[in-house]
Amino acid sequence: MDQFLVAVELLRRPELVGLPVVVGGRGDPTERAVVSTASYQARAFGVRSGLPLKVAVKRCPQAVFLPVDFPVYEAASAQVMAALRAIPGAVVEVLGWDEAFVGLRCADPEAAARGAQEAVYDAARLRCSVGIGDTLVRAKMATGYGKPGGVFRLTAANWYAVLGEQPTTALWGVGPRIGGRLSGLGIHTVRDLAEADEGALVAEFGPGNGPRLARLGRGEGRRRVDDTPWVPRAHGHETTYQRDLVGVEEVAAALTVLAEAVVADIRREGRPCVRVHLKVRFAPFFTHTKVRKLPAPTWDPEVIAATAYALYQALADDRPVRLLGVRAEMEPPAGGY
């Protein structure tokens, strides 16, 4: 979907069409929160997803800031996915509320893509970009070249012409950290990665991730869309605090609140917690994550909160806390994932 959250907001606020609009947090750029989505007009000023709102307002003071409204976006997403599933012969694999793979057998993929765009617009009055590929990776990468509102085809025939000289971080799933490690091996471009010695990749990233990165560099991977319903492995909650938490009492109390919210989620799934994940961001911006397996599966928020607190104590860091997150990894469903 193109600028999905902003696009949904513009349906409610047509007077903002054409203006720089930023959706994030409670819509207050003086608070601690990040950009969820920015309109293309705001992106021209360097405003992007994940940017702190305080930075966004400095880059684009004239922007209109709006609060995140999850129920409205979820309803719009449901309309979009229903429209895709209604396409004759379509197999739909949902990636998130604004993105999906659609598998189709057709003689004219571009015509099918335009038909999908029309179906989505008719159902939700929202526009999308479509990437066509002979693998899911190539289809995913192609969407970036189709934005906004376009269609782009990326296959084995033009993979290197389009992406060969791009940095490895242009690839889906290769962030700055992995890109840096690849650079340390002398691998700077997508073509470098495609042609890299697999043994060196295995030595650096392991027997699973090394070959996976090599395949990614070649645009290879799964070719069939899988519409098997997604089953979550975990549920988590995190909060960025407008005032830093100071002292163990404040941290312990905050972890209790997060643990109770997490337990409410996993109870709806019907599967207890087996591992507790903790995320801590100390002021000004130092982030740590830790995980601990529980002695036995549990629904008890006190056990989850106490485990998260023990992980916090293990960090042995008394700096003020800017963000806390607790994630409960659940017992696998019967028969596995």
Image (spheres, grey):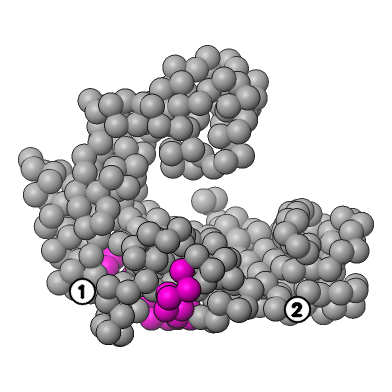
The residue at 34%/42% (across/down) is 141
The residue at 57%/57% (across/down) is 233
Mark 2–mark 1 CB contact (< 8 Å): no
Q: How crowded is mark 1: few (under 14 residues within 10 Å), some or many (20 or more)?
A: some
Quadrant of the image occupied by residue 7: bottom left
What residue would you read off at disc 2? 243
The residue at 46%/78% (across/down) is 65
Quadrant of the image occupied by residue 78: bottom left
Between residue 1 and residue 243, name the one nearer to us. 243
What residue would you read off at disc 1? 125
Where 244 sits versus 312, above or below?
A: below
Q: Which amino acid does label 1 sit on?
A: Arg
Between residue 121 and residue 91, name the one nearer to us. 121
Q: Can residue 91 be seen in this view?
A: no
Give coordinates of residue 271: x percent, y percent. Answer: 62, 66
Where 318 sits versus 227, above or below?
A: below
- Find the distance from the CA under tag 2 to the CA under tag 1: 40 Å
Give coordinates of residue 189: x percent, y percent. Answer: 45, 26
Give coordinates of residue 176: x percent, y percent. Answer: 57, 41
Secondary element under disc 2, as helix, strand or loop, is: strand
- Magenta extent: 60-83
Q: Which amino acid does label 2 sit on?
A: Arg
Does label 2 or label 1 sit earlier along the sequence? 1
Q: Is residue 155 visible?
A: yes
Where 164 sits versus 267, above or below?
A: above
Q: Does the magenta stretch include residue 62?
A: yes
Indicate which label's residue lies in the foreground, 2 or 1: 2
